[in-house]
Amino acid sequence: MRREPVRTCVGCRQAQPKGMLVRLLRSPSGAVVVDRSGRGPGRGAYVCARAACVARGLERGRLSHAFRKPCEVGVNLAEEVTGLWQR
């Protein structure tokens, strides 16, 4: 029996199965986008599908720390993450 990988949310710092989190990806231009396939190239960061976790992930550069590079976050990132999970 194969176990599902566990990832940590950058917002609330809780470890959860990978399938329960949304993967964020830093594009080459530095913008943070939602990785819908979960297999995009490069370093990813995971967040719970709650607006509060996305907001906490933006605090104090947590996403920049997770990506190990500066990043630009769009205004509607929290809405996109929560909307993706509700579908």
Image (spheres, rainbow, N blue to C red):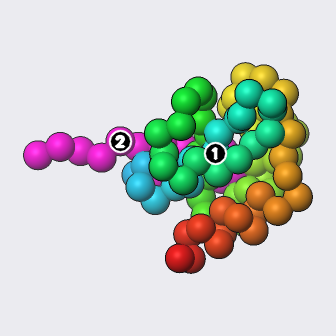
SS for tag 1? strand
Q: Residue furthest bottom?
A: 86
Relative to the observer, which residue lies in front, 40 or 62? Answer: 40
- Residue 66 vertical position relative to residue 50 in the rendered view, above or below: above
> 41 left or right of 56?
left
Q: Which residues are magenta?
A: 1-16
Residue 2 x/y as whole percent: 17, 43
Residue 40 x/y as whole percent: 53, 37
Query: Can see residue 62?
Result: no
Q: Residues within 10 Å of mark 2 (few under 14, many from 20)?
A: few
User: For residue 47: magenta?
Assistant: no
Residue 43 x/y as whole percent: 60, 28
**Cα–Cα span, label 2 and label 1:** 16 Å
Q: Residue at x 56, y 69 (%)?
A: 85
Mark 1, residue position: 24
Disc 2 residue type (three-letter): Pro
Q: Residue at x 77, y 58 (%)?
A: 77
Numbered tag placed on residue 5 in the rendering: 2
Disc 1 residue type (three-letter): Leu
Q: Nearer the viewer, mark 2 or mark 1?
A: 1
Relative to the observer, which residue lies in front, 27 or 54? Answer: 27
Q: Residue furthest top?
A: 68
- Residue 29 vertical position relative to residue 53 in the rendered view, above or below: above
- Residue 54 vertical position relative to residue 60 in the rendered view, above or below: below
Query: Can see residue 67?
Result: yes
